[in-house]
Image: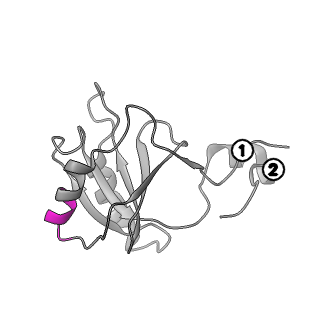
Amino acid sequence: MSTHSVKDLEKAQRKGEELDLDKLLPWIKEQGIDLYGIPRITQFSGGASNWTYRLQFKNKDIILRRAPLGKKAAGAHNMPREFHLQEKLKRHYPSVPGMIAVCENSDVLGSTFYLMERLNGMIARSTIGKKGKKAFKGKN
């Protein structure tokens, strides 16, 4: 039986990768985004390079994607490019999450990042083609 799943598991934020709410929450407010309360934050373990967080506010459940800290290869981890590409894809593919806001100022969290709506669904993985139906351990 395969140990791969189409569902990423959330865990507590990894040490050294915690979001700075003292900087993030004022930025969100400046964008005019109506989010209430202090979010419950978890971090997804899947993904090869960019860090992905779930922020559960009282009124909304969103995802934050950001580049990792440290030196980056030129052109790698381009969060604004990823944001704008998904924004364009959303017009044609309803299963793409809605984009909320992008921050190109790395002073806020130490790198660029963006916010998007959280959707439930299958995560397309390279193992699906290799393992066939065995890659599907569960359904979101």
Q: Residue at x 15, y 41 (%)?
A: 107
Report x, y in % for residue 7: 63, 54
Extreme residue toward the front, this view? 37
Query: Which residues are the magenta region?
Result: 27-32
The local crowd at label 2, few if under 14, some if 14 to 19, many if 20 or more residues have their Cα within 10 Å, is: some
* Circle 2: element type: helix
Distance between the Cα atoms at labels 2 and 1? Answer: 8 Å
Q: Is residue 100 above or below residue 110?
A: below
Q: Residue at x 18, y 49 (%)?
A: 104
Q: Residue at x 17, y 58 (%)?
A: 26
Q: Are marks 2 and 1 in contact (CB under 8 Å)?
A: yes
The local crowd at label 1, few if under 14, some if 14 to 19, many if 20 or more residues have their Cα within 10 Å, is: some
Q: Main secondary structure of the magenta part?
A: helix
Amino acid type at mark 1: His
**Residue 71 inside the magenta-drawn segment:** no
Q: Is residue 61 above or below residue 8?
A: below
Q: Residue at x 75, y 55 (%)?
A: 136
**Of residues 15 and 117, the one drawn nearer to the viewer in this rendering:** 15
Q: Is residue 68 above or below residue 91?
A: above
- Residue underneath mark 2: 134
Tell me which label, 2 or 1, sits earlier in the chain. 1
- Residue underneath mark 1: 4
* Circle 1: element type: loop
Report x, y in % for residue 6: 66, 54
